[in-house]
Image: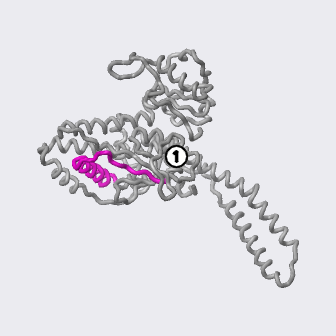
Amino acid sequence: MQTLAKWPSPSELSFSNGKDAQSEIPNSKEYFQSVLAWAKENGAEEFFLVPLEEWVPSSGLLSTLPSYPVLAQVDLPGSVTFSYLLPPVLFGKKLCFWTSEEKSLTDSYIRVLGKIEKCEEQLSKILEQEIHSIPEIIWKEEEKHSDSLLLERKLWGRRENGKRYSSSFSLAKAFFVGSLTDIREINEYELVSDGSSELETAISKFLYKRADSKYFSLLTALGKKESENGFVFTPRIYFSFGLQLLILSSVLAEAYEELVSRWIEERPQIKDALIKLGEWTEKESHPKTEAGMEAIFEERVIHLLDKYSDRSDRFLLKRLEQEYSNSQKSVSEHFQLRKKELEEKLIPDLLTQVESHSKLSLPEELKSEWENLGKTLQARLENLLLERKNLPNPEQKGNGKTPESWNVLLGQRSD
């Protein structure tokens, strides 16, 4: 699916007050008609009902799903349960409605964010003041990307040293926008704290220290780098951005839960909050060892994701297999394209140059230069032939169920 996409803002949709009193979910028929009206104004011609499990949808997937015309008064097809976790998305002339799927990565991510928000609410009650400590995300990309989603949706915040910085995204918005973006365009992303008070700053320091000390190897495997600005990551291009944020948010959820638990257990007075936070932060210190891909396969990490996303199916392992398949396909396509380029263009072009060189003779004073050029052409040709001979066949490698299979695949990546 193309990178650029459109989605309606709440102000572009109109609903009556006919919502569920407890869940605030809009009337499905009214929601459906309002989105269709918005989509029609934006050039949509057909719509699809896509399971949330398939976010982000590929063109190949949409070709297998039923499509329906975008008309002014079309009825809702069959018995459909919409998912409201993500807004409907318009890719060119194709509109995607999301249908409910309880076991998707998106569902899991939203559940983890719910745990984090609940912990912050508990902190606010304990400290008897409103706390804003949930981090947001800013990423940077090369300014040369003309098809940037940040540009199209005016989501960039500033430009600096040839880089374009995004505006500050909530964890939920970062997941949505980041999933639509080619991960290779995101040079790095950073967690930034919205809180401005001394207490909120102290809370953030504890959360980062707790996460870093307990899950250092895991965070390193996700691309965390040393920085004075807190948590800065170079995203791993072999994982989807959504999976990386799911793992990171689960680590943060554990840190929040630990902070709330300590406060309930030790019950320090509110006036001593800063002192106690400082003590807890200082004590968070563990050996910092790197373990590569092995860190992601640790049992405690598998249980971590299941715990905070309310699952019991070892979801991380299943998702790693899926991500491996996607990454392997990407690597395979890369080598196939390179092989085609070598066989159809680069090697034939050099052969022509070598043949032309052998047929020409130049004056004596240029003979040495001419011979050197011939050697250079022959060396280039030999290198290209050697590259073609050594191109691997990733399709014959592992299945993503072990860190070893991932390490083999990552050793082949060249993008």
Rendered position, 124 above or below 159: above
For the N terminus, give its image quadrant.
top right
In the rendered view of the protein, which quadrant contains the C terminus? Answer: bottom right
Which is nearer the eye, 326 or 122?
Answer: 122
Residue 265: x %, y % from top left: 15, 42
Residue 197 inside the magenta-drawn segment: yes
Q: x and y percent of residue 279 in the render? A: 18, 54
Instruction: Give the structural element (helix, strand or loop) at label 1.
Output: helix
Q: Is residue 397 left or right of residue 364?
A: left
Residue 343: quarter of image: bottom right
List the residue tagged with mark 1.
324
Q: Which residue appears at 42% of the width and 20% of the height? A: 26
Left or right of residue 302: residue 259 = left
Amino acid found under the numbered disc labelled 1: Tyr
Residue 379 drawn at (x, y percent): 72, 71
Q: Quadrant of residue 221?
A: bottom left
Residue numbers of the magenta segment: 187-215
